[in-house]
Amino acid sequence: MMSTQAIEKMLIEWQCQSLVTRSINLLDQCRWEELAKCYAEDGVLYRPSAPTIKIEGREAILASFTARPAKETCHALTNLESNIIDDRHVIVTSRVVLFAANKKADGEESLLEANADVFIGRFVDELRKIGDEWAISKRQGSIELHYKGR
């Protein structure tokens, strides 16, 4: 039988990994308001494409998402690993592969051809529990490999 402590640890890991996965799905769906709400009010984002530029605060993070050029993206998130600091602080590290394409025209149903470039990197997400909910307090993105096709 599992101990209460082991079950609590599994629950924290599941909640935190679910938040990270949900945030990436919202990113690919261009659901900016919901994505911004995954961040703490004072959250910080360092984008993979600009890993030294700090975007601070939920409103600034939302503005950075809405200012993005329109494109279709597919982030494949893998190898999620949680490091539980305590019951209110967790660091989730994950690998990400990014494929992108030009934005579909409204109502367009055809299959898009992805751009030839593929980016492979990681996210290091520092999460904290605020009340009963987990939020991203800091996301540090990086690009480690850039495959240039064609």
Image: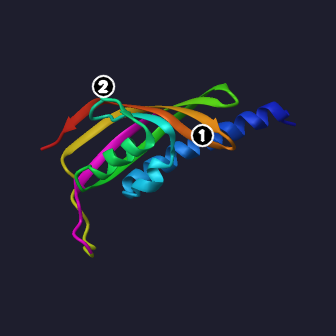
Quarter the N terminus occupies: top right
Tell me how far mark 1 sits from mark 2, CA to CA.
Answer: 25 Å
Q: Is residue 112 left or right of residue 15?
A: left
Disc 2 element: loop
At x 44% / y 43%, what residue is drawn?
A: 58
Disc marking residue 52: 2
Residue type at the position of mark 1: Cys
Please tell me whether residue 50 is drawn above or below residue 102 in the rendered image. above
Residue 49, by quadrant, is top left
At label 1, counting other C-alpha atoms closer than 10 Å, the crowd grade (few under 14, some 14-19, many 20 or more) is many
- Does the magenta segment cover residue 101? yes
Q: Is residue 148 left or right of residue 4?
A: left
Image x and y of residue 37, in percent: 50, 49
Q: Nearer the viewer, residue 33 or 81?
A: 33
Q: Which residue is mark 1?
A: 16
Q: Is residue 79 visible?
A: no
For the C terminus, give its image quadrant. Answer: top left
Q: Quadrant of residue 83?
A: top right
134 vs 62, nearest the viewer:
62
**Location of residue 87 in the rendering, given as x and y in whole percent from the top left corner:** 70, 30
Q: Magenta segment: does it hold 74?
A: no
Q: Residue at x 68, y 41 (%)?
A: 131
Horizontal side of 3 relative to 150 (left or right) equals right
Q: Which residues are magenta?
A: 94-106
The answer to whether 43 is drawn above or below residue 65 in the figure is: above
